Amino acid sequence: MRIGVAGLGRMGAAMAARLIDRKHQVFVWNRSPGRTAPLLAAGAKPAATPAALTDEAEIIITMLYDQAAVENVYSGADGLLTGKAGEKLFIEMSTVRPGDARATAAAVRAAGASFVECPVGGTIGPARNGQLLGFAGGEAADFAHAKPVLEDLCRRVDLVGPVGAGATMKLAINLPLILFWHAFGEANALIRDLGCDPEFVVGLFSESAGGPSVLRARAPAVVNALAGRGAGAPTYTIALIAKDLQLMLEEAAAKGFDLPLARQALAVCGRIVKSGWGGEDAAAIPAFWPAHVAGKV
């Protein structure tokens, strides 16, 4: 299948590489062209503009930083929808608010194309290995069209409702994950004076009722962070966590209620980012409060 991918950050590039592995003919575009080089070496074809990407592909996948980027890539000069969009399928996989997903869907449909949103749970490794968790929103027929491609990227993908439902589910899924990282950081501050080995701590918490699967999956990164060696190459940065928490709070406010835990987590993220940790991976959060208590940050 001829698939275009717009947005080659860590996740977008990993998904494009996965689709190449699955023998699709992949076309790629990124605002910074240098990011296309590894994918071109693997067999992808370049598109000079988003419009050219639409012209070449049957299905176009977008994975972009925020709604401003989505609007620009879809509707800006030489945007995706200025190409030959009629009867194409667009799969939007960025993390945005539900209303923003609906606005993009309306623009796509006005251009005569089909639209499915499918934000995902998971980071670079799962993306590269087709092990993401997909939360799709759209019409049943459009989802059926998109599903074979999404199944190449996801170990599980569900149609959770109309457009906007996928974005809602993604924000909801991210919230307890984010809160865990903060809670585990505070727990480590409590036991800092015990002088426990980080590997022992992570192993013990992993076996407890409060230790989620992400702690086991990210154990080496967390151990390294607690030991002062850093969490390694980021997959979900603390700055991105702050962005997602803000989206959650805005969505809750639009529905007439507050998310006090998310609000407090955002305030904590603000302190962490101001300390220069914004580009660090989420797995570094558990190391922040022990370091803070020790006067190191």
Image (spheres, grey):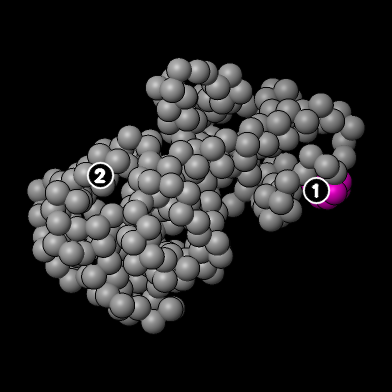
Structural crowding at the residue carrying mark 1, measured as other residues with C-alpha within 10 Å and reported as few (<14), some (14–19) or many (≥20) = some
Question: Mark 1 to mark 2: distance in Å?
Answer: 40 Å
Using the image as rendered, state which of residue 84 and residue 191 is in the foreground: 84
Which image quadrant is residue 102 in?
top left
Residue 110 visible in the displayed image: yes
Q: Residue at horizontal 72%, vertical 42%?
A: 226
Q: Nearer the viewer, mark 1 or mark 2?
A: 2
- Residue highlighted by disc 2: 104
Q: Residue at horizontal 19%, vertical 58%?
A: 113
Q: Which quarter of the rendered picture does the C terminus lie within?
A: top right
Residue 61 placement (x, y as % from top left) = 32, 60
Residue 150 placement (x, y as % from top left) = 43, 65
**Left or right of residue 175: residue 194:** right
Residue 251 placement (x, y as % from top left) = 43, 27
Q: Which quarter of the rendered picture does the N terminus lie within?
A: bottom left
Amino acid, disc 2: Thr
**Left or right of residue 265: residue 51:** left
Start-end of magenta stretch: 198-207
Tell me, yes or no, whether the highlighted magenta stretch contains residue 205.
yes
Amino acid, disc 1: Ser
Q: Residue at horizontal 22%, vertical 70%?
A: 57
Callout 2: helix, strand or loop? helix
Residue 241 placement (x, y as % from top left) = 51, 36
- Label located before the other in sequence (1 or 2): 2
Structural crowding at the residue carrying mark 2, measured as other residues with C-alpha within 10 Å and reported as few (<14), some (14–19) or many (≥20) = many
Q: What secondary structure do most residues of the magenta stretch adopt?
A: helix
- Residue highlighted by disc 1: 206
